[in-house]
Image (cartoon, grey):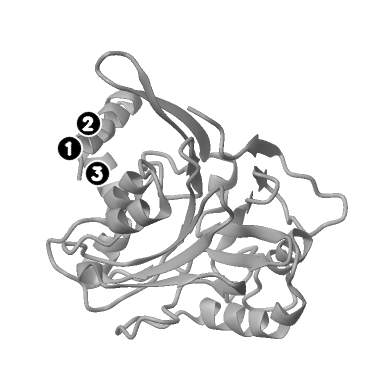
């Protein structure tokens, strides 16, 4: 992992006038929760992915336990230059305060798009590499295969579900576990992933919300073919306890902060701050995907 990423954290700490240790800890949240005896896993996000007919797209609900982050996160657009001042890469990412880019939905000028979902393996690797660092590294990737190699390093402490797309329309979902064990699935048809492993046979903490959302997906998936269908599912509130689109109402304790769409057919990125399934709801951000450096 590039040592310059620690330099990014130092720069964030200096700019925010807080300690580097505090910024580092904010990027180790899943690992700290797993290692701390009193920690608890925090149910998070979910994705609907479609690759069939003329649709090559997926969307992601970014969920968190603090609703204040809906208006206190950032959409960061960054440019990277080589030592000679030549532009190397641009990337855009949905970023939490003090956290790396790559820990939320992101895309780069090399044609790679990505989102990720927490999972909760219990066979962690003590002292291993944090998922936030490999997620940050994935933004640098040239191809989906390159991104997969970057997030499945053998020294990984924890795990994650990653979803990748490229400008050819390929959509790949990857389950990653401690030590870098992983399962790669090319999406053909439609697919849903939340915060439980579906394919890797690993010990994991159960997540009630994910079970409810997966069950709701099983009820809806036969009619999911288009981008409008994707948004309809992620905006679904039929389940009174653990809906797809979340508002923190007990027993659920998470809110949907934003919904993003990666439409590889139209090569566009869209972001909503309200339920995207509403007839009068429009994205607050629309950006082109697959742009040149």
User: Residue at 58% across / 76% down in the picture?
Assistant: 251
Q: Position of residue 253 (x, y in %)?
A: 54, 68
User: Residue at 26% across / 72% down in the picture?
Assistant: 181
Q: Earlier in the sequence, mark 3 or mark 1?
A: 1
Label 2 environment density (alpha carbons within 10 Å; few <14, some 14–19, many ≥20): few
Residue that numbered label 1 is attached to: 3
The reply to whether callout 3 and callout 1 are in contact (CB within 8 Å) is no
Residue that numbered label 3 is attached to: 24
User: Residue at 41% across / 78% down in the picture?
Assistant: 197
Label 1 environment density (alpha carbons within 10 Å; few <14, some 14–19, many ≥20): few
Place residue 85 in its image quadrant: top left
Q: Position of residue 281 (x, y in %)?
A: 81, 49
Q: Is residue 244 above or below residue 265?
A: below
Residue 36 visible to an observer of this rendering: no
Place residue 287 in its image quadrant: top right
Residue that numbered label 2 is attached to: 7
């Amino acid at each position: 992992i590039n040592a310059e990423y620690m330099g990014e954290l130092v720069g964030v700490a200096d700019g925010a006038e807080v300690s580097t240790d505090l910024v580092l800890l904010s990027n180790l949240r899943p690992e700290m929760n797993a290692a701390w005896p009193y920690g608890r896993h925090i149910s998070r996000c979910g994705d609907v992915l479609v690759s069939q007919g003329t649709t090559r797209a997926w969307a992601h609900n970014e969920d968190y336990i603090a609703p204040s982050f809906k208006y206190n996160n950032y959409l960061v657009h960054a440019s990277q230059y080589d030592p000679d001042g030549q532009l190397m890469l641009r990337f855009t990412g949905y970023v939490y305060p003090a956290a790396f880019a790559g820990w939320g939905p992101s895309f780069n000028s090399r044609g790679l798009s990505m989102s990720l979902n927490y999972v909760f393996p219990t066979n962690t690797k003590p002292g291993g590499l944090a998922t936030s660092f490999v997620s940050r590294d994935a933004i640098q990737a040239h191809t989906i295969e390159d991104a997969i190699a970057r997030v499945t390093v053998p020294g990984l402490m924890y795990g994650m579900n990653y979803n990748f797309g490229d400008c050819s329309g390929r959509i790949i979902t990857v389950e990653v576990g401690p030590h870098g064990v992983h399962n790669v699935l090319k999406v053909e048809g439609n697919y849903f992933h939340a915060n439980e492993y579906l394919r890797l046979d690993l010990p994991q903490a159960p997540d009630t919300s994910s079970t409810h959302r997966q069950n709701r997906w099983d009820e809806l998936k036969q009619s999911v073919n288009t981008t409008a269908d994707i948004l309809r599912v992620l905006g679904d509130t039929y389940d009174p306890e653990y809906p797809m689109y979340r508002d923190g109402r007990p027993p659920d304790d998470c809110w949907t902060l934003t919904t993003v769409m990666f439409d590889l057919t139209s090569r566009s990125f869209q972001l909503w701050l309200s339920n995207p399934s509403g007839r009068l709801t429009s994205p607050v951000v629309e950006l082109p995907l697959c742009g040149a450096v």
